[in-house]
C-alpha cells in the first residue's frame, strides 16, 4: 500500500517543497512507499490523502477535512519528520488491527 501525503505551507511553493523533499528522504530511509505532494493550505484541507504535514501555525487551517493533520516544527529536521511519520503509521496500524478484531 502506498501512502498519499501532502506537505503544506501558506502558498504551496516554498517551504512545502522543502518539507516534501525531506519527507521523501525519510520515507525512502524507512522503506515506505508514498506519494508526496506540496500544496497550499486551502487545497490541502479538501484533499483526499492519508496525511497532511504542515507547520504548527497552519494546523487549524488544514484541519477539518478528510485527512489527519500533523505539525512539523522544523521542516528540515529529519528526526522530527521521522518521529511524526512513525507515530502516524503506528496509529494507523493500531486502528486497522482494532477494526479487524
Image (tube, rainbow, N blue to C red):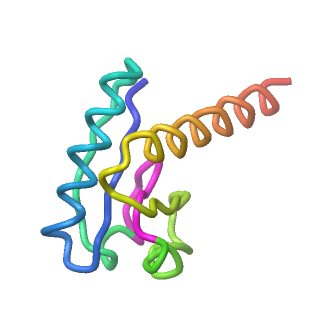
Among the 4 quarters of the image, the one containing residue 36: top left
Residue occupying the far top of the picture: 31
Look at the picture and state if 64 lies above or below 7.
below
Q: Nearer the viewer, residue 83 or 8?
A: 83
Spot occupied by residue 26 in the image (x, y as percentages of width and height): 35, 33
- Left/right of residue 24 with respect to residue 13 in the rendered view: right
Q: Which residues are magenta?
A: 45-55
How many marks do you count on the picture?
0
Q: Which residue sits at x=49%, y=73%?
A: 56
Spot occupied by residue 32 in the image (x, y as percentages of width and height): 39, 23
- Left/right of residue 88 with respect to residue 31 in the rendered view: right
Look at the picture and state if 70 lies above or below 82.
below
Among the 4 quarters of the image, the one containing residue 64: bottom right
Look at the picture and state if 54 lies above or below 24.
below
Q: Nearer the viewer, residue 50 or 29?
A: 29
Q: Which residue sits at x=78%, y=33%?
A: 99
Q: Which residue sits at x=45%, y=40%?
A: 79
Q: Which residue sits at x=34%, y=25%?
A: 33
- Left/right of residue 65 with respect to residue 93 in the rendered view: left
Spot occupied by residue 21 in the image (x, y as percentages of width and height): 20, 45
Q: Per the image, is 64 magenta?
A: no
Spot occupied by residue 59 in the image (x, y as percentages of width and height): 50, 73
> Which image quarter is the C terminus in?
top right
Residue occupying the far left of the picture: 13
> Which image quarter is the N terminus in?
top left
- Left/right of residue 44 with respect to residue 52 in the rendered view: left
Q: Per the image, is 51 magenta?
A: yes
Amino acid at each position: 500500500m502506498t501512502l498519499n501525503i501532502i506537505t503544506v505551507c501558506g502558498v504551496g511553493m516554498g517551504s512545502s517543497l522543502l518539507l516534501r523533499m525531506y519527507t521523501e528522504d525519510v520515507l525512502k530511509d524507512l522503506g515506505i512507499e508514498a506519494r508526496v505532494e506540496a500544496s497550499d493550505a486551502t487545497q490541502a484541507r479538501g484533499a483526499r490523502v492519508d496525511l497532511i504535514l504542515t507547520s504548527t501555525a497552519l494546523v487549524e487551517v488544514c484541519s477539518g477535512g478528510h485527512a489527519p493533520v500533523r505539525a512539523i516544527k522544523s521542516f528540515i529536521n529529519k528526526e522530527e519528520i521521522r518521529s511524526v511519520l512513525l507515530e502516524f503509521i503506528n496509529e494507523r496500524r493500531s486502528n486497522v488491527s482494532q477494526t479487524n478484531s
